[in-house]
Image (tube, coloured by chain):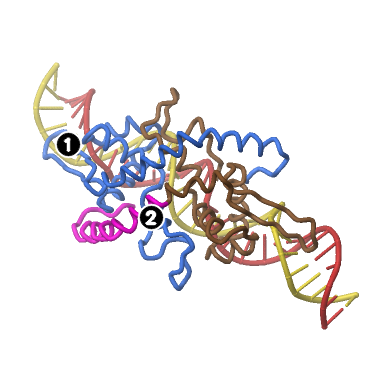
Chain colours: A brown, B blue, C yellow, D red
Amino acid sequence: MTTPSLERPFGSGADGFQPCPITPVIEILFSRWTTPILWSLHHEGPLRFNEIRERLTGVTPKVLTQRLRQLERDGLITREQFPEVPPRVEYSITELGLSLSPAFGVLGSWADENLSLVAHARERYDGSGRPRPS
Amino acid sequence: MTTPSLERPFGSGADGFQPCPITPVIEILFSRWTTPILWSLHHEGPLRFNEIRERLTGVTPKVLTQRLRQLERDGLITREQFPEVPPRVEYSITELGLSLSPAFGVLGSWADENLSLVAHARERYDGSGRPRPS
DNA sequence: GATATTAGGTTCCTCAAAGATACTATTGGA
DNA sequence: TCCAATAGTATCTTTGAGGAACCTAATATC
């Protein structure tokens, strides 16, 4: 994934006009694996690379490195390297990362209340003869 | 994009364990172009295919069709077709779609308050010699 | 001397999603 | 007869996300 520019998110025209003010946030927070990483660091304290890896079933080391760097670059997590052998690196969530809690809380509530409605809608649609989305 | 299953989001193990409870929501709401579509329909009333297209700079008809079908399947928007020539189709946001407002509001506030902090973090990181994320 | 450990880096490959471009069906009007 | 308008399709190309495998360096253990 190319790290997106903050000034020019997708969907914005040459004049910078964009019809949706939250697209920049989305590009920062909702790439694959980012919220599970933030969630793990938030709820289980500082974690090492392989500790995170164990918690994220299916993530590959290459992609995990990529995501950790992006989150570090965006100031949402920090990386601390200890000069030991074998090497040890610890990742922690930052203040800025913690400031996402309310947002994630609201999304979680929406999920609790509405995910079953989405499931029903899907059943209805799939039984309705309308074309499947690609 | 393959439409994700609600029961088995990415990052969940064979046992269904998942370290982050909001991944299912993310797969539904935060694919590319979905929030601009919802936003436009919310704030500018029912819109036709090409009216949406004009508002989403850069989207291609193929992808727009795909996204509209996914959103319709998930019950977040509806599609109404009028038997006219040339054809007319109108898309509207549903009650379920409107129920996302609080969540999007919180994300918008977070953006207002913290996007500049992210920008500063990026500048610091980029000047620090740490490797760029891929 | 051989092997394991640790946190990744690196290379090569595959496959799915996104994007670019051209095309279709319908029919009233010039 | 040709054109315009609408809501998409069809086809190809590009991008990037992800998988598998192998490499490093410093010590500790066998």
Question: In the displayed structure, would residue A83 be above or below residue B130?
Answer: below
In percent of the image, x 45 and y 36: which residue is there?
A: A10
Which residue corresponds to the image point at 59% horizontal and 43% vertical from the top-left? Answer: A75
In the image shown, does B102 or B78 lie closer to the viewer? B102
Name the chief secondary structure element in magenta. helix
**Helix, strand or loop status at disc 1:** loop
Circle 1 sits on which residue?
Answer: B87
Q: In percent of the image, x 41 and y 44: which residue is there?
A: B32
List x then y, in percent, for residue A39.
51, 56
The span shown in magenta is A105-134
- Looking at the image, residue B72 sits to the left or right of residue A18; the answer is left
Identify the residue under disc 2.
A108
* Three-letter code, disc 2: Gly
Rounded to the nearest angstrom, the CA distance separating label 1 from label 2 is 40 Å
Q: Is residue B3 left or right of residue B13?
A: left
How packed mark 2 is, by other alpha carbons closer than 10 Å (few <14, some 14-19, many 20 or more), is some
Tell me: residue A80, above or below residue B61.
below
Magenta-drawn stretch contains A129: yes
Percent from the top left, x then y, of residue A1?
55, 46
Residues A55 and D7: in front is A55
Q: Can you tell which quarter of the image residue A55 is in?
A: bottom right
Of tags 1 and 2, the one toward the viewer is 2
- Image position, residue B40 (x, y; %): 30, 35
Q: What residue type is disc 1 on?
A: Pro
Q: Is residue A80 above or below residue B114?
A: below
Seen in the picture, residue B32 relative to A55 is either above or below; the reply is: above
